[in-house]
Amino acid sequence: MKIRKAVIEDAPAIARIHVDSWRETYNGIVPKAYLEALSYENREKLWNNMIPNTAVYVAQNEHGEIVGFANCGNERTAKYKGYHGEIYTLYLLKKEHGKGIGKSLFKHCINALSQKGINSFMLFVLADNPTVTFYEKLGGEELDRVNIEIGGETLEEIAFGFDVIKITDK
């Protein structure tokens, strides 16, 4: 497995993982119609814009195929004092779970934030997402619970906060 900074040519693969991982992970959580309406084309446009403007990392398997990605940058809400960075996304195909890839992508984001002088960061995860425990094991402290709307349905997100110094050994 190899983690590297994404390049614009990775946008189609990132878009595929983004859509497929949402459909795998959020089936039964997010409205079915919303998941079915997700498109590779729309996500590719999103990632064509994100790759040059945020720190985006991809995970490649032994065959060179992209199987996961993450991106991070400055915290977007300014609501959580003391947390200056944010991991915006971290997605893997379900078949890649449990191999240490998510943790490796997470650490690459920590390093990118640290290089910008950011030593505390946060992320949001749907409360019903089975990966909530992943973030708890990495040292995430619950900061807040907020309601968001996806596909016409109200869902709860958990805001987790992290201190880089506390998680470097995990």
Image (spheres, rainbow, N blue to C red):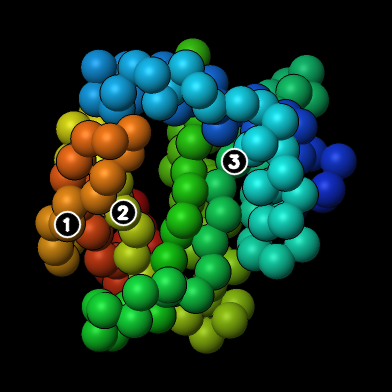
Which image quarter: residue 53? Answer: bottom right
The residue that disc 1 covers is 146
Quadrant housing residue 162: bottom left
Instruction: Kindly identify the residue that appears in the image at 64 percent across and 37 percent down.
Output: 43
Pointer 2 and pointer 3: residues touching (CB < 8 Å)? no
- Residue 143's spot in the image, x, y percent? 15, 66
Q: Earlier in the sequence, mark 2 or mark 3?
A: 3
The amino acid type of the residue labelled 3 equals Phe
> Percent from the top left, x then y, of residue 115?
60, 78
Residue at 79%, 39% (x, y): give it. 10
Q: Is residue 19 visible?
A: yes
Give coordinates of residue 110: x percent, y percent: 49, 64
Q: Which residue is mark 2?
A: 124
Earlier along the polypeptide chain: callout 3 or callout 1?
A: 3
Q: Earlier in the sequence, mark 1 or mark 2?
A: 2
**Kind of residue indicated by mark 1:** Val
Within 10 Å of the Cα at label 1, are there few (<14), some (14-19), or many (20+) other Cα atoms? few
